[in-house]
Image (cartoon, helix red, strand yellow):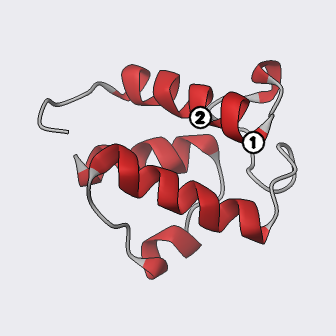
């Protein structure tokens, strides 16, 4: 993706992915929502989400960076850094 997206646009795209691919209730997706505790994602979902982020950005997120991701806002920030 060559154009620079705003964090709001990234959040909108991330929300779409979580609702469509992970069947997360859109009402639960807030910047402070925790991926595992609030959205009930598991470790396999986390790997799938990493793959989705890679496809979205055409760049690979490092495993060390991905381990630091705990909330929706963390995912948005990680995507913004990759773009």
Label 1: few (<14), some or many (≥20) within 10 Å? some
**Left or right: where 43 falls relative to 66:** right
Residue nearest the viewer, comparing 9 with 31:
9
Residue at the disc numbered 1: 22
Q: Where is residue 40 shown, x and y percent of the image?
A: 87, 50
N-terminal of the pair, mark 1 or mark 2, is 2
Q: Which mark is residue 69?
A: none
Residue nearest the viewer, comparing 1 with 4:
1
For the point 57% across and 74% down, the residue is: 67
Query: Does residue 1 appear in the picture of this structure?
Result: yes
Q: Where is residue 30 shown, x and y percent of the image?
A: 68, 28
**Left or right: where 36 falls relative to 9:** right
For the point 17% across and 31% down, the residue is: 4
Name the secondary structure under disc 2.
Answer: helix
Name the secondary structure under disc 1.
Answer: helix
Which residue is situated farthest in the bottom direction here?
64
Whether the residues at callouts 1 and 2 have beta carbons within 8 Å, the answer is: yes
Q: Where is residue 1 shown, x and y percent of the image?
A: 20, 39
Q: Where is residue 72 shown, x and y percent of the image?
A: 61, 42
For the point 80% across and 34% down, the residue is: 24
Query: Does residue 78 appear in the picture of this structure?
Result: no
Residue at the disc numbered 2: 17
**Left or right: where 81 falls relative to 2:** right
Q: Is residue 57 above or below residue 36?
A: above
Q: CA distance from mark 1 to mark 2?
A: 7 Å
Label 2: few (<14), some or many (≥20) within 10 Å? some
For the point 53% across and 34% down, the residue is: 14
Q: Is residue 69 above or below residue 83?
A: below
């Amino acid at each position: 993706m060559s154009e620079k997206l705003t964090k709001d646009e990234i959040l909108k795209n991330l929300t779409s992915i979580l609702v469509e691919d992970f069947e997360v209730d859109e009402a639960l997706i807030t910047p402070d929502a925790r991926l595992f505790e609030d959205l009930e994602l598991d470790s396999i979902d986390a790997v799938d989400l990493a793959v989705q982020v890679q496809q979205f950005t055409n760049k690979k997120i490092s495993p060390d960076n991905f381990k630091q991701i705990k909330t929706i806002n963390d995912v948005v920030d990680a995507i913004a850094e990759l773009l």
